[in-house]
Structures are given as structure tokens and as C-alpha cells.
Amino acid sequence: MQSPQAKLQTPHSKLHTTFLLFLLSSAFILSGAPLHAGETYLLEGEGIRVMFETPHEPVARELAQIYPEVREELKRTFGWDLRQTLSVLLIRDSRQFQQWVDSPLTVAFALPQENLVVINHSRMKAHPFSLRDTFKHELCHLLLHQHIQSELLPRWLDEGIAQWASDGAGDILLDQKRSVLNRVALRARFIPLSSLTQGFPRNDQDLTLAYEESKSFIDHLIGLSGPNGVLKVLDEMKQGNSVEDVVLKAYGVSLIDLERGWQRSLRNRITWFTYLSYHLYEILFVLAALMTIYGFIKIMIKKRRRIKEDLELEIEELRN
């Protein structure tokens, strides 16, 4: 069941953002040579152009260096290649970056139309993010959109495959110790995959759930038939077939039935004991606080009882 407050967002629904980034990238790409405008520079490598500010030059060089290797890894996984020169924009100003995205959890995104990846590297430094894995994740988005028509590629599949191919890395901040999906599974309040076709919710908690569900469902499919089953689905979609038709052909059951089976498996796996184990530290903290309060109350009761006994003793002595 979808949360009533959840509002859908397309991967990059702000048209002015796309246009702005397109103009920005074109200004550098059309120059054809390394240049600088103020503190902004362009580094060109093998099949890649990285736009950056001076403090990010080491990061830009790292991306240019690892790009051929990451590109080859994706080619081995999918059997597809990135066919166009890639542009990467490294953002130093988090406030500027937040004007382009819908959630403060976002640290990177891809614009397939412009073959552009935008990374808020200043935000990544403050969290245990792998630049390589995040970069690979965004490249996977570009690869999928280059080979599958965007209107045929549901957002949950796009995101789930990208997380799987990049070893679980995403383009938003996820706290694995506070899984929203685990809590949802206990109450069977999933967001239906059909609601995650065109976009993801804007609410941070629902957005996190959408990311977790996407990866979990792909993991479920891989558990049923291995990676080859999922890759077969993608190959069939590349031919222009819908995900519903392809899944029925590949797995012998409808997408809805597969989704129901995945939800049942999650409910069976996530017990209350498992859920409580995820919150062990919080539970211990609360118990310690309750014990402290209980001890304080006992001390106060004893103190008041002693005061009362002393008063009664003094009154008795006065009477005598």
C-alpha cells in the first residue's frame, strides 16, 4: 500500500534543470580544448570529459583514470557498451546542487538525454560513499537508457539494476542500519511497483523505501533464476518489448505474481526478532534510561520513607 502523502517524481522532472545542465555541459564540450572560466576547468580523457573546480582536480583525474575500467566492467556484465563520449560535472557547492534535485538525500544523478553525470562530491566526502561505486551506478543508468527505450524502462527496474550492478551503491544516502523496507515488510505496507514506474516519491522516507524495494525485487529475481534471467529480460526489452511481456516469458508468471511472491518472502524473512535486532542499541538505550529512572524513583521513595520515619520518631520523643 502506498503512503498517502507520497508524491511521485520523475528521475529528473525539473525541465529547467535539464536545460540548464545541457547548456552548461555544451559550453565546455563545444570548446574542444581544456579551458577555464574563473575556477572551472575541463579535463578530457579516454571517452570522458570531466568539468570541475580547482579543489576537485584530483577527483576529476581519478574519474578519468577509472572510467575505461568501469566501462569495461559494465560491458562484461551486460554485453553492452557505452557508445557516446561521457560528460561528468563535479559540484562543489551543495546549495547549488540541491537546487537541481528533489531530495536532500541525493548525492549524484544521471541525465541520459545529455549523456551527463552530475556528482555532489562535497556531500560524498561527509559520508562513507565510494566514488567508484557511485560513478558506476550512474554509468549504469546511462547504459540502460542507451540500449532500452526510456518509455519502456520503469524507474524501479532502472534503479534496481543500477544498484545491483554497482554492488548496492545508490545515488542517495541510505542508512542500512535503519532499513525502511524491513519495517514495511512486517506490516505489509509496500509501495506497489506499478506506482514506481514513472518516478519515485518525494518524501524522504518513501523515497528511501522506493530505492530499497527496487534493489530487493531485483535480488529476488536473481535468487529465482540467477543473473542470466534478469539479463535476458533486459535483452528482450532492448528489442522493444514491455517489461510485463518479457517477465511473463522469462519466468512463466506475471509481474504482479512475482511481486506478490517477493513480498511474501520478505514477510517470512523479516520476523519481529530480526526487526528488534536492527534496533538493539536503541532498545538497550531505552532500557538503560528506564532502569535509571526506576533507580532514581526507588532512591526518592527510600529517602522520603526515611524522612517520614525520622519525623515520626521526633514526634514520639516530643510526646514522651
Image (cartoon, rainbow, N blue to C red):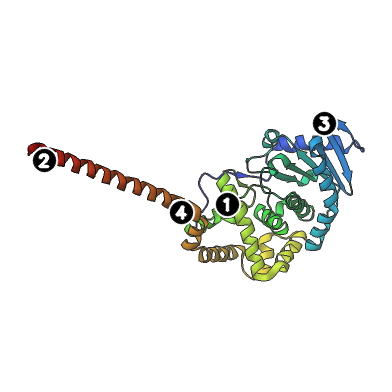
Q: Which amino acid type corresponds to the residue marked 4 in the rendered image?
A: Leu
Question: Spatial distance from mark 1 to mark 4, Cα to Cα?
Answer: 26 Å
Q: Which residue position holds label 2? A: 316
Q: Determine which of the numbered discs, if any, sits on residue 209 in the image.
A: 1
Q: Determine which of the numbered discs, if any, sits on residue 270 in the image.
A: none
Q: Which amino acid type corresponds to the residue marked 1 in the rendered image?
A: Leu
Q: Position of residue 113 (x, y in %)?
A: 78, 45
Residue 165 vertical placement versus 94 (above, below): below
Which of discs 2 and 1 lies nearer the camera? The answer is 2
Q: Where is residue 137 in the image (x, y as percent from the top left)?
A: 73, 52
Say left or right for 262 vs 244.
left
Of the residues under marks 3 and 2, which one precedes in the sequence?
A: 3
| Residue, far right | 33
Say left or right for 292 vs 173.
left
Q: Which residue position holds label 3? A: 39
Q: Which residue position holds label 4? A: 284
Dividing the picture into quarters, in which one does residue 98 lie? top right
Q: Position of residue 174 (x, y in %)?
A: 62, 50
Q: Is residue 310 visible?
A: yes
Q: Which amino acid type corresponds to the residue marked 3 in the rendered image?
A: Glu
Tell which of 8 and 108 is nearer to you: 108
